[in-house]
Image (tube, rainbow, N blue to C red):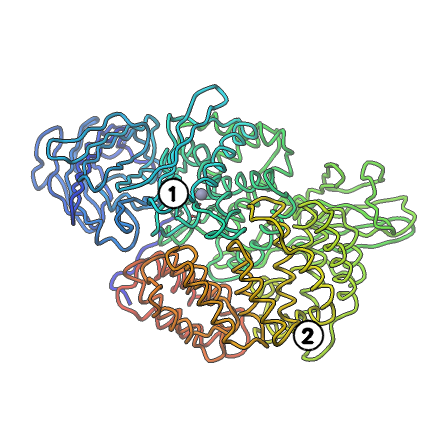
Amino acid sequence: MRDAEPKAIRLKDYEAPALQIRQVHLAFEIQPGETTVTSTLQIERVRPGETDLRLDGQELELLDVTLDGESLSANAYQLDEDSLTLFDLPDRCEIRIVNRIHPERNTALEGLYKSGNLYCTQCEAEGFRKITYYQDRPDVLAKFSTTITAGSAYPVLLSNGNLVDQQTLNDGRRQVSWEDPYPKPSYLFALVAGDLARLEDSFTTMSGREVKLVIYSEPHNIDQCDYAMDVLKRAMRWDEQRFGREYDLDIFMIVAVEDFNMGAMENKGLNIFNTSCVLASKDTATDPSYMRVEGVVAHEYFHNWSGNRVTCRDWFQLSLKEGFTVFRDAEFSSDMNSRTVKRIEDVNFLRSVQFAEDAGPLSHPIRPDSYIEISNFYTPTVYEKGAEVIGMLHTILGEEVFRRGSDLYFERHDGEAATTDDFLAAMADASGRDLSVFQRWYVQAGTPVLAVESRWQEGTFTLILTQSCPPTPGQTEKLPVHMPVAMGLLDADGKLLDPATLQLSSDSEYDIRGDSIVLHLATASTSLRVEGLATEPVVSLLRGYSAPVRLKYPRSPEILKFLAIHDSDGFAAWDALQTLLVDEIGSYSGRRRVSETLIELFAALLEQAQAAVISGSDEDRFMLAARLSLPQESYLFEQFEQVDVDALCAGRDALQQALAAELREQWLALYQAARSVDAYQPDAAGMSRRALCNLALGFVAVALEGGELVELLEAHYSQADNLTDRRAALVAALHSTSLDSAVSRRLLQRFLDAFRNEALVVNQWFSVQAGSPTCSAQDIQTLAAHDAFDGRNPNKIRALYSAFAQANLRNFHAADGSGYQLIADTVLALNSSNPQMASALAKPLTRWRRFSGMRPGLMRQALERLAAADDLSPDVYEVVIKGLAD
Ligand code: BES
Ligand code: ZN
């Protein structure tokens, strides 16, 4: 256990500083082994209050500090482990600080660090304090200028804003100066120094200004940057058209780095990206990776307004920028591709990952009220539930009013640090709506349950809707929230009744939105009556997943099948089928055959899929691939209060076996029909066809055996001209129970031999193995010892250990506890070198309460072993303590 317990930071203790840094000049002298930082700060009193200035600083070596040009006497300041406090400052002054840092030794990848031969920074949330002493908090906005001096091995020297000067010094070193005219908090600072190649382009903004666009990467990757550049231009145009947001500097830069804890970072004018979220080529990125690049490039660009021009007052407001920006990037992707498919993917993620968090000891509101380590709060709750909440506002207000609210928010708070309440106030003012009940989404944790009952009596149909929310840590009583419930009524032929013609009544407010009714449930319970109907309608409920809730609406398999076939809302049709599949798997008892209902449904969908390959739209193909996909294990687990790992995995396997065997010819026919004749294109036509083809391959690999299977898999692999198909062959081989393991080993070896030099492909090589049902904890250790593995690279750690703990649930939850031990060992190994990665990896162990049998005890043992370790980082400490407190 640690010596001093880290303290919780609380929202209610927030206080704005009286003295603030208004301007800062940073001079970096980069030398082998050490970097010297000279920081010149202009300080101003902005409100009455104290005269001492506390600057954050960690792992810094202070060399000098002066106040208005005078050296400070020893009693004029105080230095400790994580701060430098200057006493008795005047209302205005200049402070100059010189300190030394060692980027080469920085393994936590926070602050200034080296990734290979490249210097780069990551400052969000509290990394700037590892560069120099500063008010490292988002409500201190200052104008930054930066001078970087480095040897000729680092010809590219970048920072935020516009380039103002560059020269070669007499000794051959290079010196470059940048100036960012927009005041910003320190977490948006960035610096890059290295020998980088560049891809250049330009964009003309809506007011006619030309912006230079540059993507930098290591020279050998520069031919993988075109896709990201194309996305960037589309995102810039889209933000102008959809949100009226124009870019504001002369240059926008993206740098790709190999070692990065997160996906990407929105530093002003100088986004820094994990290579996995920016590079793409047919041989190094799968179709989902292309989609990820699209989403992340857009997301970070959109932060220029939602995050940078208007930033967060404090880190409790994180969802202000992240939830809103995830909403914005999801809208972008929906406009670029299929809206329904994007919605299904997002709901899949929300239900498997965010619901899991919300049902465990780490549950927190999207605006948390306390934290120990802020890095632990970049969570699916703050991000994805946060985006759902914005999406509900959009549904409640409608596009036009929502846009007015967003304009008002940006106008009111431009250049400021704002709160989620400010955002809601702008929305309320623009719409004239009372959002006080809606505001509870921000402060209450837990996933609300929406229970629905229906009655049919003499031509009157009544729906009764009731909401509740289970208790979460520290919150036992929950109040009702305002949730928009979108629905439609289908007649006996499956035709949607036009809501405008219905005789509706309710004690709650409702709107007609297109072909749906949107009922505003803002109390514990309400009802909706429909009169004058000839026959009982079937309800299409929570269309488009209009609220992030668990729906409890018992319906017969016949009704679900009816909806799966007829519902005109693509999401709701998918959802009905998923519910059938979950019910089928959940009721598996060891040998029962799969239900006729499902076989018939799948047979019908397979027929449609074959037709869609030949003459359907891209959207048809994508949708059919989504509907024919079985729920992932992580999704399944979240549908049950008590998780019986063995029963659910066996049930899923049995269902897959049965569907594969019963419909073997249909899967084969679909597979053959969807095989490509054209060269790879990362477009909707190609992606949707591959989605169907590789889905069919998965079932075919389960249905076939022997030489026939070997031949098919080897042909699929050999004929592939892209990573998506090669990976699909490997996955199918590794998931087959009949295939001789020598065959999969051969394919894996071919794959590694061909792509050994492509880090992103090697990551895939690790993750397909780590996620395969035959890969045990022992096998993970063997893979970790492989030459191609690098235990310090976050992408490799994710490809191996996170893939195992998150996508290989049957082995992570192995009955002997070996999966838990492996993860605990790895958390301990990473705890001091990279606390953020360590803590992310520890999180799955905290879900122990959900499992049945011996597993809770074994998971707790692993947590207790972590708790007993010396020198636990605050990151891991917080997760472990909360995990054990449950
Ligand atoms: N601001 C974050 C990156 C970040 C998160 C930095 C946590 C430091 C700590 C960035 O905008 C972000 O949200 N990135 C996501 C991807 C995005 C598409 C949701 C990421 O990195 O995973
Ligand atoms: Zn973000």
The x and y percentages for residue 823 are: 40, 69
Amino acid type shown at disc 2: Tyr
Q: Can you tell which mark lies on residue 222?
A: 1
**Is residue 272 or residue 48 the one in the foreground?**
272
| Label 1 crowd bin: few (<14), some (14–19), many (20+), radius 10 Å | some
Residue in the picture at 39% in, 28% down: 212
Residue in the picture at 48% in, 25% down: 411
Look at the picture and state if 359 lies above or below 273.
below
As helix, strand or loop, the secondary structure at mark 1 comes to helix
List the residue tagged with mark 2.
588
Amino acid type shown at disc 1: Ile
Look at the picture and state if 572 lies above or below 190.
below
As helix, strand or loop, the secondary structure at mark 2 comes to loop
| Closer to viewer: mark 1 or mark 2 | 1
Residue in the picture at 46% in, 74% down: 776
The x and y percentages for residue 796 are: 38, 60
The x and y percentages for residue 302 are: 47, 36
